[in-house]
Image (cartoon, helix red, strand yellow):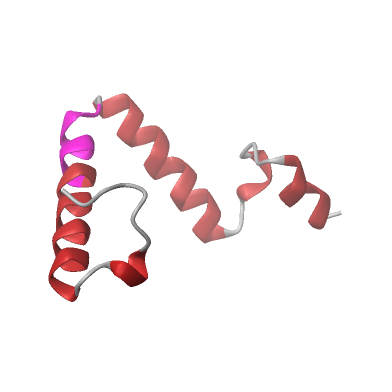
Amino acid sequence: MVNDHQHSKDLSFAEMMSLKSSSRDRQVDAVYAAAPEVLEMAAARAKAVLRGNSGSIARPQRFSALSN
């Protein structure tokens, strides 16, 4: 695997694609390993945001301050 401190401009195209692929694989593995309740909560949050009902979702202060 590519050194974590190596800047992306120093990577070859093949290295970038390999890094992207392994990152995607880790994300998919995390979804499959997650408990159904956690996935349901994440889906509910995503649906609320898409519907514009995101007021009940806790956000970092810097984003909350923008909506005032």
- Residue 30 highlighted magenta (yes or no): yes
Q: Residue at x 20, y 57 (%)?
A: 19
In this picture, residue 47 sits left or right of residue 22: right
Give the quadrant of residue 61: top right
In this picture, residue 5 sits left or right of residue 60: left
Q: Residue at x 26, y 48 (%)?
A: 3
Residue sitting nearer the eye, 34 or 10: 10
Q: Is residue 57 visible?
A: yes
Q: Position of residue 48 (x, y in %)?
A: 52, 49
In this picture, residue 16 sits left or right of residue 53: left
Q: Which quadrant: the C terminus?
A: bottom right
In this picture, residue 57 sits left or right of residue 8: right
Farthest residue, direction bottom: 13
Q: Position of residue 13 (x, y in %)?
A: 18, 75
Q: Is 57 placed above or below 49 here?
A: above
Q: Residue at x 44, y 42 (%)?
A: 44
Q: Is residue 67 visible?
A: no
Give the quadrant of residue 57: top right
Q: Residue at x 15, y 39 (%)?
A: 29
- Residue 29 highlighted magenta (yes or no): yes
Residue sitting nearer the eye, 11 or 16: 11
Q: Is 30 placed above or below 49 here?
A: above
**What secondary structure is the stretch in magenta mostly built from?**
helix
Q: Position of residue 17 (x, y in %)?
A: 17, 67
Count of numbered marks? 0
Farthest residue, direction right: 68
Q: Is 63 placed above or below 50 here?
A: above
Q: Position of residue 64 (x, y in %)?
A: 76, 47
Query: Magenta stretch?
Result: 28-34
